[in-house]
């Protein structure tokens, strides 16, 4: 054990990794050695801090200095000024972390973190995920020890039931009940699975937990194994998450070495081990029956339910399947009790939820909020508002299965039931903010395009129905919408929802239905007036030259790539709408702002 | 295979290492490390603090540096902040004075008067 006077925490999550955090670590190591600070200063690679927008992020303790967008060239300054002379490098501090009196705010007082409550992300950005001892330091594996030595299987299930925890994978099914069903199911062999497929576009909650705190999932799965009577766990993780896969492998190795996985854990007679299964990244493989088929080595296609996995799952045996984030909640619930957990959140939704915040928002990144926090708080306080002084138009939750929440519902508390009421859903935690320049028909088209691409094709309503819907949306956004298209969309949506085999198809029409609910006038404008009110659908734009402002300088005509502009110098020019490809170059080049986009 | 007791030992031992990363209210030792401080020998003093705290496995102490404290002729200067108590400023510190400050002041709450700024200044004025 060594006491280091200073710890340099460097984010090694995928976001910061991509923006070069590995180079930073190398540079810190090199300079610290050069300055002979190895015995005083410790460099730690952690999981995601959440503010990916500002990456790579470096936090130096004990001061808690939060350095953002650190370059390799900045490292020398941090080492020489901060680590040697104790002078914080103000220039690199995250602006929001500097208090009025010029001191550094505690991280929990910074706008982005203030309203957050980190339960599942408790260790992310704090511990070294490749070091089991650091996980143990913050009470890791204590919950497993507790259930194995002090609690009966029934007590464990009761605790989870009373906590009110619901599945974080999208469905929101009560976790304790699922555990009870699997516990009750008859079978000589049972399995515990973790769904780490995370296929929603833009979502990276589960990845961040696996990268930042892999042991929390392993510990929870072992607890679940004890509760339902299983000795074998599988984690189904997508191969596109190489850092998560590597850290999971390291974590499993370390846990086995310590005897926290394997036979006779804590001398209790309980055996449990975990294996990884890599998925190829098909969205439909996140669906539970498809996921299990894929683990069995078959094609990842859904099958009808019932039978549900709890009675007939993996290899035909009773199987418990939970999401990564669901599991990460388990150890704190066991240690702090169901009452503690159920005191957080709302009536029907307990605890917290992790969101990946993206789109037109200042602080893109990862956040964890108590259930019941309003959308307004997320967008304007945690998210820091919309860039460029633009107006908020809508937020999309639930990815391709979810819907849009318009500005009139900004005060909606984020919980399972309220989101359903406004026509969206919690989903797994993608949260995309859209500003006034976003076309809602185009957004619906984007998500439907994704579903059509990802449909496994097993059942016709989904395979053919979603394709028909996409064709109509393509038509509308390219200015060829017809009278009656909206009604056709609605009929198709209704039929697909009622007859598709799995959740993918059943929820695929949601983005269209919810945008129709709140932005029907935008659909109508596209169809009837051939106009895109947000000015986003290029096919519907017209560029025109305002005669009064045009000085006849001919710049536009020179730059137009298709020679659509003609005229005589010193008199107004005209754009030939037939030839125009709506690239907007003329508007950019006009020194007199004489070109109008409508 | 690890027993619960061993787990607890790992927890305690590692917590001492990582505890620094949580916002805490413990004792702060601040060493003046501007040019004047470094010239006067502040680094060996800082290192001695780190070593001494290490040896005694003190969990609730952080050691940090600061710029010039302002009285260059009295460097190396070390300030000790204990929660709820006035700051104590030690001047003309040397590595061999560190053990006493740690054992007397940080552990037993008895500031080492003869190293403090008030004492040294008074004596110099006489
Ligand atoms: C098309 C489709 C994709 C899904 N993808 C995921 C996923 O990536 N991760 C996940 O945990 N659950 C996903 N689910 C939900 C799972 O089927 C299942 O309900 C969930 O993993 C159960 O865990 P929970 O109760 O802890 O939420 C998906 C469902 C459907 C229909
Ligand atoms: S609904 Fe779509 S994804 Fe699901 S089984 Fe049918 S075709 Fe496959």
Image (cartoon, rainbow, N blue to C red):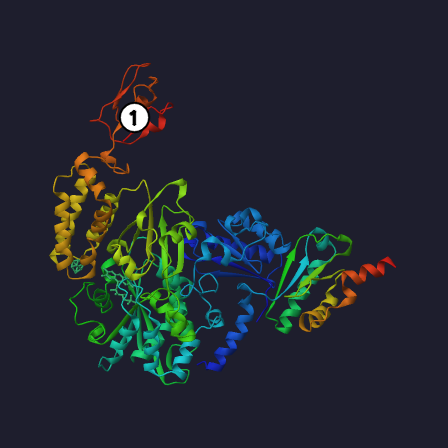
Location of residue B115 in the rendering, given as x and y in whole percent from the top left corner: 77, 64
Quadrant of ligand 1: it is bottom left
Q: How many numbered dots are placed on residues in this image?
A: 1
Q: Is residue A458 visible to the viewer in this orientation of the structure? A: no
Question: What residue is shown with label 1?
Answer: A560
**Where, quadrant-wise, is the C terminus of chain B in this rendering?**
bottom right
Q: Is residue A596 above or below residue B58?
A: above
Decide which of B53, A228 is in the foreground and name it.
A228
Residue A49 position by quadrant? bottom left
What percent of the width, then of the height, locates residue A254?
A: 43, 72
* Residue A191 position by quadrant: bottom left
Disc 1 crowd, CA 10 A, few/some/many (<14, 14-19, 20+)? many
Q: In this view, does A441 lie above or below A369?
A: above
Q: Residue at x 37, y 53 (%)?
A: A357
Q: What chain is tagged by disc 1?
A: A
Residue drawn at the location 42% of the way across and 79% of the way down: A145
| Image x and y of residue A121, in percent | 42, 63
Label 1 CB, ligand 2: below 8 Å? Answer: no
Front residue (pair B89, A502): B89
Q: In this view, does B43 lie to the left or right of A55?
A: right
Q: Residue furthest right?
A: B126
Quarter holding the N terminus of chain B is bottom left
Q: How far across and down, in percent of the image, does residue A271 sit? A: 35, 81
Say if residue B110 shows up in the picture: yes
Q: Is mark 1 on a helix, strand or loop?
A: loop
**Which is nearer the eye, A118 or A64?**
A118
């Amino acid at each position: 054990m060594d006491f280091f006077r200073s710890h340099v925490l460097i984010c090694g999550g995928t976001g910061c990794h991509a923006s070069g955090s590995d180079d930073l670590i190398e540079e810190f190591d090199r300079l610290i050695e050069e300055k002979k600070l190895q015995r005083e200063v410790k460099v730690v690679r952690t999981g995601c801090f959440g503010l990916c927008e500002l990456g790579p992020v470096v936090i130096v303790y004990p001061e808690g200095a939060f350095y953002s967008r650190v370059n390799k060239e900045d490292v020398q300054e941090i080492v020489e000024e901060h680590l040697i002379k104790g002078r914080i490098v103000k220039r690199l501090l995250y602006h929001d972390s500097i208090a009025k009196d010029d001191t550094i705010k505690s991280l929990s007082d910074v706008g982005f973190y203030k309203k957050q409550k980190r339960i599942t992300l408790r260790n992310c950005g704090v511990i070294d995920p490749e070091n089991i001892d650091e996980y143990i330091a913050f009470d890791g594996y204590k919950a497993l020890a507790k259930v194995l030595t002090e609690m009966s299987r029934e007590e464990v299930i009761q605790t989870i039931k009373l906590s009110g925890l619901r599945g974080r994978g999208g469905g929101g099914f009560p976790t304790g009940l699922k555990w009870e069903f699997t516990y009750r199911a008859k079978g000589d062999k049972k399995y515990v699975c973790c769904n780490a497929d995370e296929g929603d576009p833009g979502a990276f909650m589960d990845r961040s937990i696996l990268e930042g705190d892999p042991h929390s999932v392993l510990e929870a799965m072992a607890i679940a194994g004890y509760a339902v009577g299983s000795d074998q766990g599988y984690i189904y993780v997508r191969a596109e998450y190489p850092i998560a896969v590597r850290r999971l492998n390291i974590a499993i190795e370390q846990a086995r070495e310590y005897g926290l996985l394997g036979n006779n854990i804590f001398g209790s007679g309980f055996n449990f081990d975990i294996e990884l299964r890599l998925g190829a990244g098909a969205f439909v493989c996140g669906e539970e029956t498809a996921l299990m088929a894929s683990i069995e080595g078959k094609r990842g296609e859904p099958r009808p339910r019932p039978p549900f996995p709890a009675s007939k799952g993996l290899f035909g045996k009773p199987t418990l399947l939970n999401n990564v984030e669901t599991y990460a909640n388990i150890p704190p619930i066991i240690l702090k009790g169901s009452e503690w957990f159920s005191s957080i959140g709302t009536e029907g939704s307990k605890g917290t939820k992790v969101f990946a915040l993206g789109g037109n928002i200042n602080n893109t990144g990862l956040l964890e909020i108590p259930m019941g926090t309003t959308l307004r708080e997320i967008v304007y306080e945690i998210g820091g508002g919309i860039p460029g002084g633009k107006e908020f138009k809508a937020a999309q939750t639930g990815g391709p299965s979810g819907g849009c929440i318009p500005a009139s519902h900004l005060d909606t508390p984020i919980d399972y039931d309220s989101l359903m009421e406004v026509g969206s859903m919690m989903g797994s935690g993608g949260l995309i903010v859209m500003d006034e320049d976003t076309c809602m028909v185009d957004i619906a088209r984007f998500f439907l395009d994704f579903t059509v691409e990802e449909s496994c094709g097993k059942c016709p309503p989904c395979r053919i129905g979603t394709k028909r819907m996409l064709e109509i949306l393509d038509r509308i956004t390219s200015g060829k919408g017809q009278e009656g298209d909206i009604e056709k969309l609605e009929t198709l949506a209704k039929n697909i929802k009622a007859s598709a085999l799995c959740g993918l198809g059943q929820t695929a029409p949601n983005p269209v239905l919810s945008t129709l609910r709140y932005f029907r006038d935008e659909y109508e404008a596209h169809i009837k007036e051939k106009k895109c009110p947000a000015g986003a659908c290029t096919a519907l734009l017209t560029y025109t030259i305002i005669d009064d402002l045009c000085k006849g300088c001919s710049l536009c005509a020179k730059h137009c790539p298709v020679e659509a502009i003609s005229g005589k110098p010193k008199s107004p020019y005209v754009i030939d709408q037939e030839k125009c490809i709506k690239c907007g170059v003329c508007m950019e080049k006009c020194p007199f702002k004489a070109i109008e986009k409508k | 295979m690890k027993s619960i007791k061993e787990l607890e030992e790992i927890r305690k031992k590692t917590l001492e290492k990582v505890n620094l990363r949580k916002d805490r209210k413990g004792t702060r030792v601040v060493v003046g490390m501007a040019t004047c401080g470094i010239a006067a020998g502040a680094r060996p003093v800082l290192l001695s603090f780190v070593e001494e705290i290490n040896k005694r496995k003190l969990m609730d102490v952080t050691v940090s540096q600061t710029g010039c404290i302002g009285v260059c002729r009295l460097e190396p200067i070390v300030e000790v902040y204990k929660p709820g108590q006035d700051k104590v400023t030690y001047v003309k510190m040397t590595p061999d004075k560190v053990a006493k400050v740690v054992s007397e002041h940080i552990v037993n709450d008895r500031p080492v008067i003869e190293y403090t700024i008030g004492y040294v200044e008074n004596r110099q004025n006489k």
